[in-house]
Amino acid sequence: MKASIKVCVFASGTGSNFQAIMETESLACEIVLLVCDRPGAPVIDKAKQKQIPVHVFDPTSYPSKQAYEEELITVLREREVTWIFLAGYMRIIGAHLLQAYHGRIVNIHPSLLPKFPGKDAIEKAYRVKVNKTGVTVHYIDEGIDTGPIIAQQEVKIYPTDSLKTLTNRIQKVEHQLYPKVINQLIQNEG
Ligand code: GRF
């Protein structure tokens, strides 16, 4: 179903989650824009291949976070975006955007939050030898990976795991969980 709910994905990197969302047949919304803060990031080509419009910006060419976020808000409103889904967006969302899209910015993080927030979460869990980690989908607030949790899924860490096998297993879970949660959020609001 391609409904009239218009959403935007923010991503800075490879874009495997973006791709998983985009390729979900039963997606209850339309991705009308990809926002990327890293010119040249592989995710940009993934969007272009599927004819999804892209807004790329270089944060270093703006005087402040407020300046580029104000521009972002204009672009998002022009496209009637009502939800923002972060998928590997490596920048903290500032007060302006948070206020404009209050309760409508969601992130995916590769750990069982509140454990292992921030960068390299899979590696941190692997190195401290916990026996499980996982994936969290949560709302964004002012902190780093601290917003209210929407959904979590556990991923076991086996003694035979390498960082790569664990990463692959976590990504597989991410690619299923995120589209599912996006659909639930959108369907819940009727
Ligand atoms: C994912 O692990 C996501 O949980 C984290 O950043 C990574 C993005 O990966 N926030 P990709 O670019 O979607 O492959």
Image (cartoon, rainbow, N blue to C red):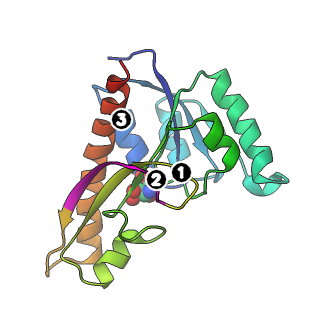
Question: Which residue has dot 2 on it?
Answer: 147
Quarter of the image with the N terminus is: top left
Dot 3 or dot 1: first in sequence order is: 1
Q: Which mark is residue 141?
A: 1
Dot 3 or dot 2: first in sequence order is: 2
Dot 2: within a 10 Å radius of its alpha carbon, few (fewer than 14), some, or many (20 or more) residues?
Answer: some
Question: Looking at the image, is 144 positioned above or below residue 51?
Answer: below
Q: Nearer the viewer, residue 51 or 73?
A: 73
Quarter of the image with the C terminus is: top left
Quick check: marks 3 and 1 in contact, CB under 8 Å? no
Question: Is residue 54 found left or right of 88 in the rendered image?
Answer: right
Q: Amino acid at mark 1?
A: Asp
Question: Looking at the image, is 29 positioned above or below residue 19?
Answer: above
Q: Amino acid at mark 2?
A: Gly
In the image, residue 37 lies in the stretch drawn in magenta:
no
Dot 3: within a 10 Å radius of its alpha carbon, few (fewer than 14), some, or many (20 or more) residues?
Answer: many
Instruction: Give the CA separation, mark 1 to mark 2.
Output: 5 Å
